[in-house]
Amino acid sequence: MKLRYVRGSRPTLLAALLDGSLDYAHVVFTELDETRFECRIAREGRIFLTMRSDHPLAARAAVTIEDLRGVPLSMHCEGNGVADLMLREAQARGVALDVVRSDNELPLRLADAEDGRAATLTYLPLDDDPRHPNLVSVPFEEPALAWKYGVVARRGAGDSYMMRYFAGEEIDWPAIVREIDERKEKTG
């Protein structure tokens, strides 16, 4: 089996699974049509608003979509499940988002946050990340703003071992998390 990196939106990857040009794809999604696809979840969590530590929302315990009024955002592209969910929820609440960049590349969006141009959405908190010392992440309080990450295959096409392997279940995630926590404790 060949592995390849494909840059594309969630709909592009799901279409490639349906037409058979991909057998498995790692996808971040907020919802998945289980009649057409099966998935083994590797990780899941909440969405965070990540910004400079001097941003007006940085000291909050949680933020709402209503708090985003007038806040410049560097967002994922349309077709990304998280971006689509955020736009749908904002529209339902009557909040016009001020999107100044739309790109799936996290380094670009983090650069916007570090420069103070825009806050961005991240899947994990970046507080105390030595690579981004000036950034803080605040969770959204809405439980609907959640994501899942896993390996997706066309319904009925997935081999259980391969699905498990590509989902990372062969990896000892708890040991990795413990090692990261121990490193954080040592570095202060």
Image (cartoon, rainbow, N blue to C red):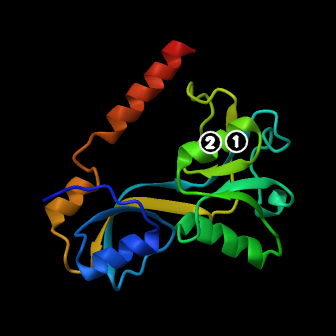
* Residue 124 in view here: no
Look at mark 1 in the image and give the residue it sits on: 113
Q: Position of residue 60 (x, y in %)?
A: 79, 43
Residue 159 sits above or below residue 20 on the image: above
Residue positioned 43% across, 28% down in the render: 180
Amino acid on which disc 1 is placed: Ala
Q: Quadrant of the N terminus?
A: bottom left
Amino acid on which disc 2 is placed: Leu
Q: Nearer the viewer, residue 75 or 90?
A: 75
Look at mark 2 in the image and give the residue it sits on: 110
Residue positioned 82% across, 33% down in the render: 54
In this picture, residue 19 sits left or right of residue 31: left
Q: Position of residue 182 (x, y in %)?
A: 44, 21
* Residue 118 in view here: yes
Q: Quadrant of the C terminus?
A: top right
Using a 10 Å C-alpha cutoff, classify the residue at mark 1 as few (fewer than 14 neighbours), some (14 to 19) or many (20 or more): many
